[in-house]
Image (cartoon, coloured by chain):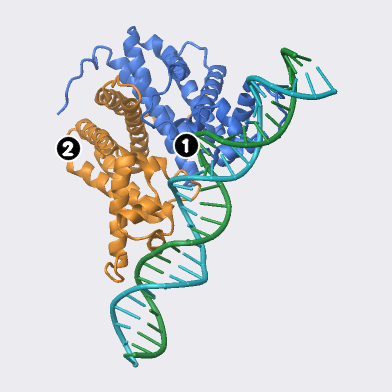
Chain colours: A orange, B blue, C green, D cyan
Amino acid sequence: MARRGEHSREEIRQMALDAAETIVAREGYPGLSTRKVAAAIRYTVGTLYLVFENLDDLTLQVNARTLDALYEWLRARQDKGNDPEQAILALANAYAAYAEAETPRWSMLFEYAVQENAQPEWYLHKLGRVFGLVEAALAPLSADALETQRIARVLWASVHGICLLKIRQRLTLAGNQDAEAMTRMLISHFLCGLRQGQGQKFSPPNPVQ
Amino acid sequence: MARRGEHSREEIRQMALDAAETIVAREGYPGLSTRKVAAAIRYTVGTLYLVFENLDDLTLQVNARTLDALYEWLRARQDKGNDPEQAILALANAYAAYAEAETPRWSMLFEYAVQENAQPEWYLHKLGRVFGLVEAALAPLSADALETQRIARVLWASVHGICLLKIRQRLTLAGNQDAEAMTRMLISHFLCGLRQGQGQKFSPPNPVQ
DNA sequence: GAGCAAATTGAACAGCGTTCAGTTAGCTTT
DNA sequence: AAAGCTAACTGAACGCTGTTCAATTTGCTC
């Protein structure tokens, strides 16, 4: 038993988050449990509930850390050149590389949180910060900030979809078709349409059927 | 207790799958449990294990049903016209509509199965059948069948990413930005690049950095 | 040294997946 | 009809889970 007052609440919090990250890295999100975290930091479950609301809360905090790490990872790999396509491609490849390097943490961002409870404001802010990088890279291609945001979301959702496919296939089939080539195809094709269709606005929508 | 011989193994199997679908529709994948399924069909857990290997197996069977339902759903909404872009757009919208209409079932396709165990052959076949619809719609745009397959995967991964974003936002923020417009943007932009870049091949890859 | 309050514990509860010895029910054989 | 057999079915048990909270321990103050 840890001696009383040996660690501050904040210290316990950080220790628990560290331990949770280790467990997730080793066993994935399903392997995360309060008892394991408690044992890892040499406290008991009861103590965890003084520091976190519940396991969902702890999970959210781990995800928040992941978002911070992802943000820094992407920032460190930004292409500062003048070509927007290169910049976006670099960002997409960095994103895919993070998913590859930190698969369990990255997966947990999406495996959790599908509940009906809205994420708190501060969490959405961290998310927005990541999206902001994409918007910044896309900004040179569009004057309208709102349009840039929409485009960024479409493009990033697509990049994310490709990453998902990549990770899934790495787990199931060994036939690892090149995700980087897929991303490159997506972005070059997508930007082609973007450059051509400056006049063609997508808001308000132009119904198809 | 159900009387012995009242239902054949296959009948029990179907009853269990029906019950599981109902539970998932009501409570989502996390709400699915062997005990609930057993109670719903008025048998006990032990019987379930005579019919299914374990809960993972049952889950896979439910997903297989969902894939079949999705395939039929998409087929029923195919655009038989001559314009490939229209056909793909119709398919994408149908996919998004299914995700919307059957969110828990659809989500379960991806929430499960991230394990390291490969999906069985027959399951991958059902998956391939769905992908085949996309490839068929794209076929007029490319002579090379392999290239068509690659393009279909990129495009569909992207459509899926947008669907994910849509469903997530429906669950978190009420600010439901139009997913249909996003899909339309993706497809029209993507196909622009496809039409232009016939000469530009993506295999073998042309490294970027 | 007594008393207090905060920190920490761990047993308890309900639920989970999974197993398997034991019971039951229908059919066959005598 | 009775006995025996076998497949169907049960449900208690095991070890795990998240969560709660009365009870205990600890360091500090008076």
Of residue A2 and residue A29, the one placed in the foreground of this image is: A2
Q: Is residue A27 left or right of residue D23?
A: left
* Identity, as a three-letter code, of the amino acid under mark 2: Asp
Say if B193 sits above or below B18 in the image: above
- Residue A24: x percent and y percent? 32, 44
Circle number at residue B178: 1
Q: Is residue B138 left or right of residue A187?
A: right
- Residue A29: x percent and y percent? 37, 42
- Residue A127: x percent and y percent? 34, 47
Q: Residues within 10 Å of mark 1 (few under 14, many from 20)?
A: few
Q: Are marks 2 and 1 in contact (CB under 8 Å)?
A: no
Instruction: Give how far apart the Cα atoms at labels 2 and 1 are.
Output: 31 Å
Circle number at residue A79: 2
Of residue B60 and residue C21, the one placed in the foreground of this image is: C21
Q: Residue at x 63, y 22 (%)?
A: B9
Say if A25 sits above or below B207 in the image: below
- Local secondary structure at mark 2: loop
Q: Residue at x 60, y 31 (%)?
A: B47
Residue A17 visible at all: yes
* Identity, as a three-letter code, of the amino acid under mark 1: Asp
Of residue D21 and residue B93, the one placed in the foreground of this image is: D21
Same chain check for tags 2 and 1: no
* Disc 1 chain ID: B
Q: Is residue A207 left or right of residue A156?
A: right
Check the image and name the residue furthest to the top: B143
- Local secondary structure at mark 1: loop
Residue B177 visible at all: no
- Residue B12: x percent and y percent? 64, 26
